[in-house]
Amino acid sequence: CVAVAMAADMLANTRVGFIGAGQMAEAIARGLDKAGVVPANKMCASDVNVGRMKVFESLGTSVCSSNTKLAETSNVLILAVKPQVAEKVVTDMKPSLSKDHLLVSIAAGIPISKLQDWAGEARIVRVMPNVACMVGETAAGMSLGKTATPADSDLVTTMFESVGKIHVVDEKLLNAVTGVSGSGPAYIFMAIEALADGGVAAGLTRDVAMSLAAQTVLGSAKMVLETKKHPGELKDMVTSPAGTTIAGIRELEDRGFRSALINAVVAGAKRGEEMS
Ligand code: NAD
């Protein structure tokens, strides 16, 4: 009860500023507003692109003429610019940042140590979300900077739960998060495309095959999350003796389906390490 009251109290005093009002920022802003976690009128955005500011205005948020002004009006700042411009953006803001600011960076691959150097006293939380923010179903990992508090962790968790799911991990494991859920959507898009191709090869129209393939991935994921059963158990449930599914599974095992996915995740995590 105390934790819930504290979170509600914190949210009441939260003004969220988006540094960069691009696709990810818009997705998060829409999620926060829709879930009632932070209403649009308590959010603000700044962007060098006027068109993007107009999009935010249409959501009911205010806009700021500069990132520095944003820091004056917001106590939680979401760093949502591309990683290449992050250093300049944050160092330019440094004089207006204090320990009363929580800087939540979603910029891929930028370590907390660098963010802290650039931002000075602000508390830092680094989040690795994925593209499904845009449909409210992101799978994200987050790590806390040295001065970030448990209350900051709760706040960021509540915020990102409005657009999906988030887990706290050690920063060194954010590359593993990247391998599974950051890059994962691309693997699943490929799987959906291939399942649909199989359907077309077996005689279905493209539209029907694509819808069946995507809905099958959605339904299977829901079953794992909602039943909390091991996926192997769920697989056994739908695999009858000498049936159609075991014939397909045999093909997948023969082609190294599982090890291909395991290796893809490890390769993505390794590449993330090389890049950071
Ligand atoms: P985006 O290009 O849609 O948004 C970036 C925005 O920043 C643009 O609107 C741009 O005009 C603005 N911008 C550029 N310079 C600026 C400045 N000096 N001040 C203020 N705004 C400025 O990009 P996105 O896809 O929303 O990605 C944003 C961040 O999220 C990136 O750092 C990326 O690494 C991270 N991320 C993205 C995804 C994804 O799937 N898109 C997934 C995980 C993490």
Image (cartoon, helix red, strand yellow):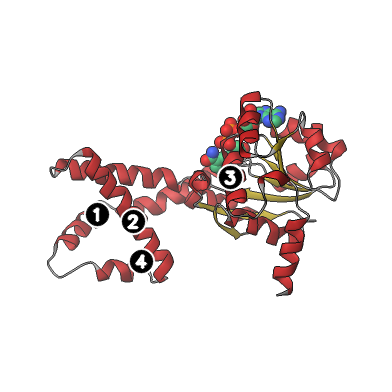
Disc number at residue 30?
Answer: 3
The CA span between labels 4 and 1 is 16 Å
Q: Which residue is mark 1?
A: 252
The CA span between labels 3 and 1 is 39 Å
Residue 120 screen position, x and y as percent: 84, 43
Residue 217 screen position, x and y as percent: 34, 53
Residue 21 screen position, x and y as percent: 64, 34
Q: Which residue is mark 4?
A: 231
The CA span between labels 2 and 4 is 13 Å
Q: Compared to 156, does 194 lie above or below? A: above
Which residue type carries mark 4? Answer: Pro
Q: Nearer the viewer, mark 2 or mark 3?
A: 3
| In the displayed structure image, the side of residue 185 where residue 193 appears, left or right | left
Q: Which residue is mark 2?
A: 258
Crowd around label 1: few <14 · some 14–19 · many ≥20 (10 Å) = few
Which residue type carries mark 2? Answer: Arg
The residue nearer to you, when weighing 184 against 113, is: 184
Identify the mark nearer the N-term, 3 or 4.
3
The local secondary structure at tag 4 comes to helix
Residue in the picture at 86% in, 46% down? 98
Identify the mark nearer the N-term, 2 or 4.
4
Which residue type carries mark 1? Answer: Leu
The residue nearer to you, when weighing 89 against 29, is: 29
The CA span between labels 2 and 3 is 36 Å
Tell me, yes or no, whether the two marked residues, 3 and 1, touch with CB atoms within 8 Å: no
Q: Compared to 148, does 129 lie above or below? A: above
Which residue type carries mark 3? Answer: Arg
The CA span between labels 3 and 4 is 32 Å
User: Residue 56, can we see it?
Assistant: yes
Identify the mark nearer the N-term, 1 or 2.
1
Identify the mark nearer the N-term, 3 or 1.
3
Q: Is mark 1 within 8 Å of ligand 1?
A: no
